[in-house]
Every structure is written in C-alpha cells, then in structure tokens.
Image (cartoon, rainbow, N blue to C red):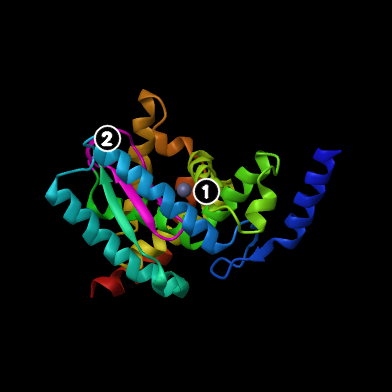
C-alpha cells in the first residue's frame, strides 16, 4: 500500500515534471529543480576536491592546469552564449592526478578532468576541448538533472517527498554521486556530442579532433573499458554522426580562428 502511494506520488510528480529544455527543445523528465541540482552538485564537487586534496591527488602540474583552464575558459564563454542562465554559474575546473580515463561537468559548471585521460591518450588541446565541450554540454542541456531524476526514481521515490518539498538537500548529495555513475541515455549522449563539437568549434577548436578523440578512446578500450566509457555508451554510429557534423562546424571554427 505504501509502495502504491509512493508510486502514485512519483507518477504525479513525473507528469508535473516534464519540461522543455530551452537549448535542445527536447522534453525532459525533471524531478529536481536547477537550484537543487546545483546545490547537490556543489556539495558533491567540494567533497570530491577535498578527498583528492587529502590524498595528494590534485595535480601540481602547473603547465597542465594552465592548459586546462585556458581551454575551459574559452568553452565557458560559448556555453554562456548558448545558455545565458549559465552566466550566473560558479564555474570551476579541477585537474585530478589519477590514471583513470575520465572527465565530467556537473550541473552548475563544476568540472574535473583526470591526468590519465590527457597523458595516456596524449590529447591535443583540440581533443581536450572536445571532451570538455561534450561534458559542458551535458550540464547546459540539463542532463545531470535528468540523471538525478532517474536516480530518485530507481531509489523507489523514497526521498521524493522531501526532495519535492525542497527540505533536505543533504539527501541530494548521494543522488548527485549516483547520477555521476549512471550512464547517460543514448539521446543525451547524441545531444552532448552535437552541442559539444559546436561549443568547441565556436571556441576555435578543430572539429576533426572529435573524430580523433573517439578513435583514441576506442583503442584505449583494449585494456578494459575506460571509466569514461562506462558512463558514456559508445554506439558504433557515434563517429559517423560526428563525421557528418564536421563540415557544418568548419565555418564556425574558421570564423573563430580569424
Ligand atoms: Zn557524455
């Protein structure tokens, strides 16, 4: 009986929570507000950075830190044009010194990239821009909120009442953690690819790097799937779709470079 009530509440919330994304125009299931998503992400981010610091895992490579900052700063300018509400975000990027092949951007613009992905794949600036452009796109397209909503749904809606009431933000920190480990939907991935390559092109980064990046990523797959791929399904048509976008992106890239 209790379960049925929760399911009814969840269904009602679901019906009330379909929103049209202002950037993509796609209808999304959203059970958490932008403010809640950002608050929980800020908390999860602070915790991640804290833990990395305590383990001595914050990268002290000044050149790499400056490089990542320079690239993400240029992407942020374009993200703020594409999604103006993100102008109020407290953007932040951390380089974490771990061998994992991973990078992410949480709701509200909290980013990380791991030294492993840069070094093992010997990434160029253009390729780093493709990764971070893709990740930033997940954030400005509201995909983190979608994943949090799914995390809530898979937890059986147990915390739904307090979340909808906006009372207890502490329960959202684990939701943010879970959301980070959940794979994105294929639809969300295609969107992030599409907008990511555009952000990078507008910021002056070569669209062809999207192809070389995924080639490197699939080759790295030989030693067990990179963590990045565990949350980023890699359909066979992904590179084809990116390839088809390159000619459309070249004028944006050339304009940005001139
Ligand atoms: Zn993705």
Q: Are marks 2 and 1 in contact (CB under 8 Å)?
A: no
Residue 171 as seen in the image, left or right of residue 87 = right
Residue 71 found in image quarter: bottom left
Residue 4 is inside the magenta segment = no
Q: Place residue 86 in its image quadrant.
A: bottom left
**Foreground tag (2 vs 1):** 1
Q: Is residue 14 above or below residue 90?
A: above
- Residue 48 location (% of width, % of height): 36, 43
User: x%, y% of residue 107?
Assistant: 46, 57
Judge the density around disc 1: few (<14), some (14-19), many (≥20) Cα neighbours within 10 Å.
few
- Name the residue carrying label 1: 170
Secondary structure type for disc 1: helix
**Tally of numbered tags:** 2
What quarter of the picture does the N terminus occupy?
top right
Measuring from the top left, give residue 199's x and y in whole percent. 38, 64
Is residue 99 within the magenta segment?
yes
Q: Is residue 11 left or right of residue 21?
A: right
Looking at the image, residue 32 lies above or below residue 117: below
SS of the residue at dot 2? loop
- Identify the residue under disc 2: 98
Which sits earlier in the primary sequence, circle 2 or circle 1? 2
Separation of marks 2 and 1 at Cα, in angstroms: 28 Å
Q: Residue at x 66, y 39 (%)?
A: 154
Which residue is nearer to you in this view: 226 or 85?
A: 85
Q: Write the start and end of the magenta stretch as one range.
A: 97-122
Q: Position of residue 100 (x, y in %)?
A: 32, 34
- In the image: residue 238, left or right of residue 211: right
For the view shown, which residue lies furthest in the top direction? 223
Image point 79% across, 45% down: which residue? 7
- In the rendered image, the quadrant that contains the C terminus is bottom left
């Amino acid at each position: 009986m209790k379960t049925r009530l929760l399911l009814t509440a969840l269904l009602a919330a679901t019906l009330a929570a379909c929103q049209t994304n202002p950037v993509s125009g796609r209808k999304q299931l959203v059970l958490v507000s932008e403010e809640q998503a950002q608050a929980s992400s800020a908390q999860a981010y602070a915790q991640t950075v804290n833990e990395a610091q305590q383990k001595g895992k914050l990268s002290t490579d000044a050149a790499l830190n400056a490089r990542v900052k320079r690239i993400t700063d240029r992407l942020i300018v374009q993200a703020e044009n594409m999604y103006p509400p993100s102008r109020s975000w407290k953007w932040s990027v951390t380089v974490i010194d771990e061998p994992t092949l991973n990078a992410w951007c949480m709701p509200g613009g909290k980013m990380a990239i791991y030294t492993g992905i840069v070094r093992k794949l010997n990434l160029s600036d253009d390729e780093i821009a493709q990764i971070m452009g893709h990740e930033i796109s997940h954030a400005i397209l509201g995909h983190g909120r979608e994943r949090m909503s799914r995390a809530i749904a898979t937890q059986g809606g147990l915390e739904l009442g307090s979340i909808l009431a906006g009372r207890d933000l502490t329960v959202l920190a684990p939701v943010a953690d879970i959301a980070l480990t959940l794979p994105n939907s294929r639809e969300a991935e295609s969107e992030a690819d599409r907008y990511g390559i555009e952000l990078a092109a507008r910021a002056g980064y070569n669209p062809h790097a999207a192809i070389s990046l995924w080639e490197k990523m699939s080759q790295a797959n030989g030693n067990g799937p990179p963590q990045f791929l565990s949350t980023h399904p890699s359909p066979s048509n992904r590179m084809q779709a990116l390839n088809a976008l390159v000619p459309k992106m070249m004028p944006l890239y050339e304009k940005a470079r001139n």
